[in-house]
Amino acid sequence: MKTTILILSILLTGVSLSAQKSFYDFTVKDINGNDFALSQLKGKKVMVVNTASKCGFTPQYADLEALYKKYESSGLVIIGFPANNFLGQEPGSDKQIQEFCQKNYGVTFPMMSKIEVKGDNIHPLYNWLTTKDLNGMNDDEVKWNFQKFLISETGELVGVIPPKSKPDSEEVLVWLNAKP
């Protein structure tokens, strides 16, 4: 009886059970095709970035790597998600992307397998990141390559940084230096 009342209460208040899904509930594929459970990042600040190798913002890889190196010991994890959603600016395979990132920028932060960050085939993580009913913060479609999503130590979406903003922008630094 209590379960029925709880379900009815949820339905009547318009709260979606899917809104309870957390960043930590997702498992993605890394660039080598292995499962990468986001739950292993509990207690860390996470920056999720959709990347591309042939974009005017591609030099942000260097800024992302520098930020990662500077704040990794403080609990920052940057996760790159290559995506080919904007003018075909990420045409390569996962292997080609990995080689490009290593050779040109010395990327050591985790890179994931290429995904879709918008449209009909949007990856479930990016659907969560961009849908208020799921993430509890706001609706915010991915506007271009190198858009940055900030995730708190508790797995909540707490900010979205536009593609043009550098990874070490003032807003990001304030977030990184804020105490939990």
Image: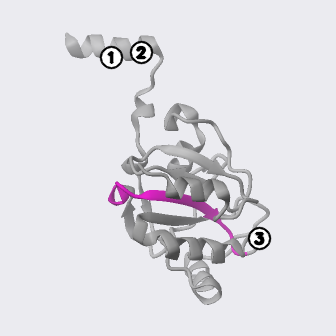
Tell which of 12 and 56 is nearer to you. Answer: 56
Crowd tier of the residue under label 2, counting other residues whose Cα lies within 10 Å: few below 14, some 14–19, many 20 or above: few
Above or below: residue 35 compared with residue 109: above
Asked whether the viewer can see residue 147, the reply is no
- Viewer-side label of 2, 3: 3
In the image, which residues are magenta?
A: 39-53
Is 13 positioned to the left or the right of 106 in the image? left
What whole-number distance in Å separates the C-alpha atoms at marks 1 and 2?
Answer: 6 Å
Query: Residue beneath label 1, please?
Result: 7
Q: Quadrant of the N terminus?
A: top left
Crowd tier of the residue under label 1, counting other residues whose Cα lies within 10 Å: few below 14, some 14–19, many 20 or above: few
Count of labels in the image: 3
Mark 2 or mark 3, earlier in chain: 2
Q: Position of residue 111 (x, y in %)?
A: 51, 71
Asked whether the viewer can see residue 51, the reply is yes
Above or below: residue 99 compared with residue 142: below
Q: Element under label 3? A: loop
- At 46% from the left and 65% from the top, the residue drawn is 77
Q: Amino acid at mark 1?
A: Ile
Tell which of 99 and 140 is nearer to you. Answer: 140
| Numbered tag placed on residue 55 in the rendering | 3
Q: Amino acid at mark 2?
A: Leu
**Contact? badges 1 and 2 (CB < 8 Å):** yes
Q: Quadrant of residue 21?
A: top left
Q: Element under label 1? A: helix
- At 58% from the left and 76% from the top, the residue drawn is 66
- At 68% from the left and 62% from the top, the residue drawn is 146
Residue 169 covered by magenta stretch: no
**Contact? badges 2 and 3 (CB < 8 Å):** no
Query: Residue beneath label 2, please?
Result: 11
Q: Element under label 2? A: helix
